[in-house]
Image (cartoon, rainbow, N blue to C red):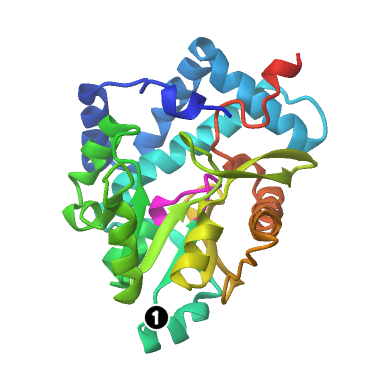
Amino acid sequence: MSQEWIQQSERSNPFTLKLIRWIALHIGRRFSRILLYPIVAYFLLTSNKVVRSSRSYLKRILGRPAKISEVARHIYTFASTVLDRVYFLTDQYERFDIRVHNAEIFDSFLKDKRGAILLGSHLGSFEVLRALAISRYHLPVKILMYRDHNQMITTVLNALNPAVAASVINLSDADAMLQMQEAIESGYLVGMLGDRVSGNEKKTSCKLLGEETDFPSGPALLASLLKTPIIVFFGLYRGGNRYDIHFELLGEEVSLNRKTRNEDIQTWMQMYADHIEKHMRQAPYNWFNFYDYWKDYNKD
């Protein structure tokens, strides 16, 4: 089980992050995006792991070896979404063309004050949903995440919007699952990312882009335990100032049979993986798992 994404150190420092934040807020998005080019060049020249993982993924999604320009585009797409977090967290939505698809899926949940699991992934921007839901639509949202991972950038950016920061349920807390249960029972939409396995977390094997890889069992287990629906979402960056947010109901009720529990979990998580692959093919440069996701390095 790969722990590379946890072990990776942050390749930045507080001064640099604060400088980028200041430039973004005081000089504007157009000029700030120009600064992304030397950042992309820096990663191309100094981070073999990022380049290697990008090539591994792009070869799968494109069906051929990736050109260096395509690897650069992949990293630039990720850097663009990180930069845009500054604007989302400061409620500058007028800068963007944000198109929401299938938002009516929430009508019955909000009307009946029912909670649900919002299951995202590292495909596209999680921040566009989090900031939009909390700041613009005032939806009752809580977010499950590890605060300690990428702590520097999280601290710098969350300082821009305390309301968004306050929505986090820290998975490192001993009572994190109790907090989640209470939120669901109170009618909150609880967001989480379900495409990475961490620590000793239970896992299941799913096929993604034609090959088996590990997915966490947690989302299916939690939905079954809490008797809550699962809604999958993707905040895809389309270039320029455009984002498309997609919502899809994965299941109204997740039921796990005690005799076939592992098989049932695998079925639910494979359905989730299939949703990821569908949107991955529509927006191939939005895949932001820059580590040995399919464990290719051991096959060389």
Choose top left, top right, bottom left or bottom right for residue 31.
Answer: top left
The percent coordinates of residue 52 (x first, y second) are 63, 19
Circle 1 packing at 10 Å, graded few (<14), some (14-19), many (20+), is: some
Q: Is residue 263 above or below residue 1?
A: below
For residue 27, say whether it is visible.
no
Q: Is residue 35 left or right of residue 274?
A: left
Main SS, magenta residues: loop
Under tag 1, what secondary structure? loop
Which residue is at the front of the view, 263 or 280? 263
Q: Which amino acid, by three-letter code, is at mark 1?
A: Arg
Q: Residue at position x 39%, y 51% from top? A: 127
Q: In this view, does 185 lie to the left or right of 224?
A: left
For residue 261, say whether it is visible.
yes
Q: In this view, does 284 lie above or below 58?
A: below
Q: Is residue 274 above or below residue 252?
A: above
Q: In this view, does 191 lie above or below 226?
A: above
**Residue that numbered label 1 is attached to:** 114
The percent coordinates of residue 205 (x first, y second) are 69, 43
The percent coordinates of residue 22 (x first, y second) are 21, 35
- Looking at the figure, which quarter contains the C terminus? top right
Which residue is at the front of the view, 188 or 236? 188
- Looking at the figure, which quarter contains the N terminus? top right
Which residue is at the front of the view, 225 or 216? 225
The percent coordinates of residue 157 (x first, y second) are 25, 41
Q: Indicate whether residue 237 is drawn in magenta.
A: no
Q: Indicate whether residue 126 is drawn in magenta.
A: yes
Choose top left, top right, bottom left or bottom right for residue 59.
Answer: top right
Q: Residue at position x 70%, y 17% from top? A: 298
Residue furthest to the top in view is 46
Q: Residue at position x 44%, y 69% from top? A: 226
Q: Residue at position x 22%, y 38% from top? A: 155
* Magenta-tinted stretch: 120-128
